[in-house]
Image (cartoon, rainbow, N blue to C red):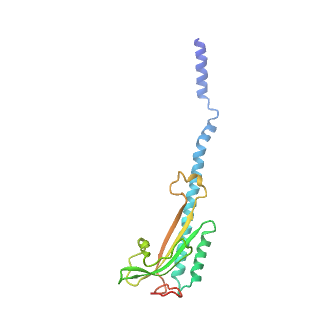
Amino acid sequence: MRSAFRRIKARITGFKRNEDGMASMEMMLMLPLYLFCIFGTYSYWDAFDVANRAQKATYSLSDLIARQQTSVTEAYVNGMFGTMEYMMGPSLPVETRVTSVFYNGTNNRYEVIWSRSSTPTIPRLTTATIMSLQDHLPIMQDGDPLVVIETEVQFEPIIGLTTWAVEGLESRTMRNVIVTRPRFLPKICMQGVACG
């Protein structure tokens, strides 16, 4: 009987010390985590790339309009919308709004000179609705002008498998609000619109 126990014990000890197949088992345990890290890193890189391109494109539009030396036209502003879409590429839906404002010190408020948007889903700003951007507007002196460029880029990660664990990368809108002073004109006016 003891010899049978010794043989069983020897087999169990031999099985315990046998390391055949350990590398395969370790790979099977670590491969999902490894792949998740690779795909998660790629998803973050993609999100930062889109955010960076959107911000640079918005700054470019802001600079284009701030350097105007004459009043802008409807065609020029519509061309800016097309430029924004071109810079972001066909796979990223973009909505843009351009607004020219000045600060009225007498009434202690920002007043809209004109506003145009690329789609009806973003309504044009008015003097009554400009307060929705008050957090983005600087403190100004009476009569100081500004150009406000707003862009919204719809972002959805290429690899959606990682978004359940990578918080903040779900399908969302990346929004930029850029405020710039006109460089050469006292106000950026639009042809055919009263420049109050």
Q: In the image, is residue 10 above or below residue 106?
A: above
Q: Residue at x 61, y 44 (%)?
A: 31
The residue sitting at 48% across, 73% down in the picture is: 178
Q: Observer-nearest residue: 21 or 146?
A: 146
Residue 115 at x, y = what percent? 50, 79
Asked if residue 59 is positioned above or below residue 6 in the image, the reply reads below
Residue 100 location, x and y as percent? 48, 81
Q: Between 136 and 107, which is closer to the camera in this rendering? A: 107
Residue farthest toward the top in the current orientation of the protein: 1
Number of numbered tags placed on the structure image: 0
- Eyeballing the image, is 94 above or below 167? below
Residue at 59% x, 52% y is: 161
Q: Which residue is drawn at 50% across and 54% down?
A: 167
**Residue 49, placed above or below residue 61:** above
Pick the front one: 51 or 92 = 92
Quarter holding the C terminus is bottom left
Residue 22, image x, y percentages: 62, 35
The image position of residue 45, as x and y in percent, is 57, 59
Query: Where the N terminus falls, by quadrant?
Result: top right
